[in-house]
Amino acid sequence: MMVQKFCKLVQKNTGISCVILLLLLVVSLVMCVSIGSADISFLDVWRIIFHKVNPGIDISDIKPGVQNIVIYLRIPRALLGMVVGASLAVSGIAMQAFTKNPLSEPYVLGISSGASVGAVLSIVSGLILPWGTRLTIPVGSFCGAMASILVVYALSRTGGEITPMRLVLVGVAISAICGAMTDFIVYTAPQDAQVREATFWMLGGLGNASWDELPIPSLVLVPSIMVMLLLSRPLNAMMIGDDTAITLGVPIDTVRKVLIFLTALLTSCSVMVSGCIGFVGLIVPHLVRAIVGADHTRLIPLASIFGGLFMIWADVAARLVCRPAELPVGILTALIGGPLFLWMIHARKYSFGR
């Protein structure tokens, strides 16, 4: 009874719920910055942040090493986790709306498998790009992801249109092929260090986060959410059925192409900076949909914020579980997301598309 009342309250006050979640997100970001192998005072984190805004604030009592950890390591890592989580959540909504399949996720298009091929190939080959070694793996993963989605898109077209079933089947096949290619590259890698680096990347993580990696996924995320919000009513109609959507004047083929483009762009930009972090794009839309329903005008903004929250706290847990070592966050997202999904099914509090 309490859960039902809470869900109805959130549905009636979506705007207020978004504001509350945004405030919780800001507080969580600061808390996550203060937690790690070297704990930093919550108040000191705020002082360092405000010092960057107003240099007149005195932080001379805080060690320079602590300041550098906050500014150059933890803040960009927390922000990148937020952006990646939101991107994967929005991508998951797009794919579930496209296919009308509750098991769809951003990686169903073979994007993650293609990214793995590009990234692992960059690691094993020792390729160094003109603009620096740090961007070699992200660029390689992005190229691999875009190559795979182009192949999936080309093979999924039939009669000038793209059907959800054909897209999923082609995506599964391309994922299998790319997965085999990745395994072959790793298996034949000449150095053990390359195998470890490739394996850690494929498991997903935010350990290499920096300010340089934030602009691209952030600039992609904001307009993508805006476009998804503009498409919320057509998506609601498409969830009812294609015939209903056509009757209401929804250009189904155009909407589907936009959804594929947004999913490919969001997922590619996320994978290139964080590796393959699974289950976020699957579980977050379902969790939020279980609370607010299938109306995309409420689902999209709430899921994007919750996706960011989910990811930054999963990353904190990844830093603490094997402290001082770091566990790949992709392992934890699956360990957390799987039981949550099973609980939702067992509790019978969730019905896709309603």
Image (cartoon, grey):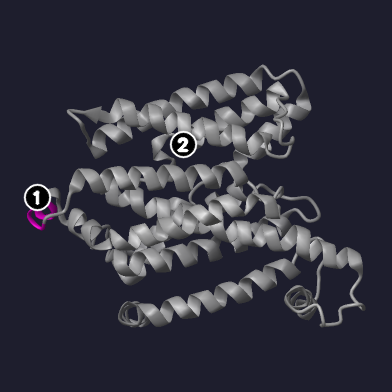
Residue kind at label 2, given as amino acid type: Ile
Q: Residues within 10 Å of mark 1 (few under 14, many from 20)?
A: few
Query: Which quadrant of the structure image shows residue 117?
Result: top right
Q: Nearer the viewer, residue 71 or 282?
A: 71
Magenta extent? 243-248
In the rendering, at what x and y percent does residue 187 appear?
65, 20
Image position of 335 (left or right of 67):
left
Query: Which quadrant of the structure image shows residue 8?
Result: bottom left
Q: Is residue 336 visible?
A: no
Give the SS element for disc 2: helix
Query: Disc 1 to disc 2, how far (Cα)?
Result: 30 Å
Q: Residue furthest left?
A: 247
Q: In the picture shown, does residue 256 fall above or below 86?
A: above
In the rendering, at what x and y percent does residue 231 appear?
28, 58
Q: Is residue 64 visible?
A: yes
Q: In the picture shown, does residue 59 fall above or below 330?
A: below
Give the SS element for disc 1: helix
Residue drawn at x 30%, y 62% is 230
Q: Which mark is residue 243?
A: 1
Q: From the image, tell me which residue sits under label 2.
A: 111
